[in-house]
């Protein structure tokens, strides 16, 4: 009996619900038809978008498609790298060519300036050569004088050891003077040695600088530079032959 009344209540509730829904739909169609149409369109659009998203998600999770996309991406990347490398090589080649042209023209314009620099460097090297030779000659003279004074000092030292106090005063003054001169000349010898070494270092420095300028002019200053270099080498060869 309870089951019967439960079924009856359910049927009545269902009938009332259907009646309410029919009434509501009828009212909407009668009074708000545009809104109903818009709602249906929105529902259809939502359903289509939802289906597309589901399809894309399934496609994105497909291993074969992922591998295919990865291969396609690697192929595009590799092609882009080749294009970039070729473009870079062309740009570098153009840049190097332009730089070479600029430096060639610049050095041709600088020929007179570089030639003067070479002459100046060669003149300074010659001055250092003379400076070194003078220092060597002075050191030889000092060394000769030092030998004489050392001999005199030894002689006076022996004399002072043999004489009495009364006869030593004059020779003692001379001995002190000679000793001072010997010590002074020893200091001069050391300083002259340093001066000779300094002269050799600067002579080598300016000889290298002069040679570098000579070669740079011959290689980079166009026809005028090459002709100048040839004349310079010819004069050098003639000078060496004249000395032999």
Image (cartoon, rainbow, N blue to C red):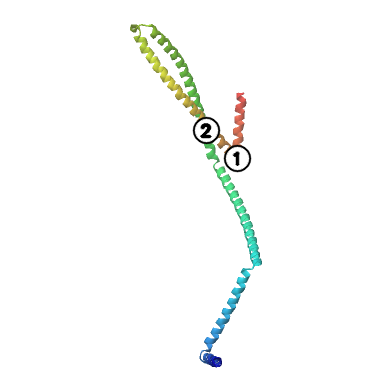
At mark 1, the secondary structure is helix
Residue 233 at x, y percent in the picture: 61, 32
What residue is disc 2 on? Answer: 205
Residue at screen point 52% across, 39% down: 113
Residue 179 at x, y percent in the picture: 40, 16
In the shown orientation, is residue 239 left or right of residue 135?
right
Count how many numbered circles sit on residues in the image.
2
Tell me if mark 1 has few (under 14), some (14-19) or many (20+) residues whose alpha carbon lies within 10 angstroms of its own.
some
183 and 56: which is toward the camera: 56
Residue at screen point 59% across, 33% down: 232
Rendered position, 91 above or below 238: below
- Which residue is outermost to the left? 166
Rendered position, 20 above or below 80: below
| Front: mark 1 or 2 | 2
Tell me if mark 2 has few (under 14), some (14-19) or many (20+) residues whose alpha carbon lies within 10 angstroms of its own.
some
157 and 103: which is toward the camera: 157
In the shown orientation, is residue 173 left or right of residue 199?
left
Residue 159 at x, y percent in the picture: 40, 8
Q: Where the C terminus falls, by quadrant?
A: top right
What residue is disc 1 on? Answer: 219
At mark 2, the secondary structure is helix
Residue at screen point 56% across, 43% down: 107
């Amino acid at each position: 009996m309870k089951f019967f009344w439960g079924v009856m209540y359910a049927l009545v509730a269902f009938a009332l619900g259907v009646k309410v829904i029919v009434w509501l739909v009828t009212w909407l169609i009668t009074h708000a038809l545009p809104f109903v149409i818009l709602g249906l369109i929105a529902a259809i659009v939502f359903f289509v978008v939802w289906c597309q998203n589901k399809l894309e998600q399934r496609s994105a999770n497909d291993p074969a498609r992922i591998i295919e996309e990865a291969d396609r991406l690697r192929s595009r990347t590799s092609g882009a790298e080749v294009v970039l490398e070729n473009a870079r090589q062309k740009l570098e080649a153009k840049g190097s060519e332009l730089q070479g042209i600029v430096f060639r023209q610049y050095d041709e314009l600088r020929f007179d300036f570089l030639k003067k620099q070479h002459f100046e460097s060669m003149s300074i090297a010659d001055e250092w050569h003379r400076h070194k030779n003078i220092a060597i000659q002075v050191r030889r003279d000092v060394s000769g004088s030092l030998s004489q004074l050392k001999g005199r000092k030894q002689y006076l030292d022996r004399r002072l050891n043999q004489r009495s106090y009364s006869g030593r005063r004059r020779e003692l003054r001379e001995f002190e003077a000679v000793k001072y001169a010997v010590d002074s000349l020893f200091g001069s010898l050391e300083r002259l040695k340093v001066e000779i070494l300094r002269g050799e270092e600067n002579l080598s420095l300016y000889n290298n600088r002069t040679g570098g300028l000579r070669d740079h002019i011959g290689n980079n200053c166009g026809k005028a530079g090459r002709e100048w270099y040839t004349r310079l080498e010819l004069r050098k060869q003639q000078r060496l032959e004249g000395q032999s």
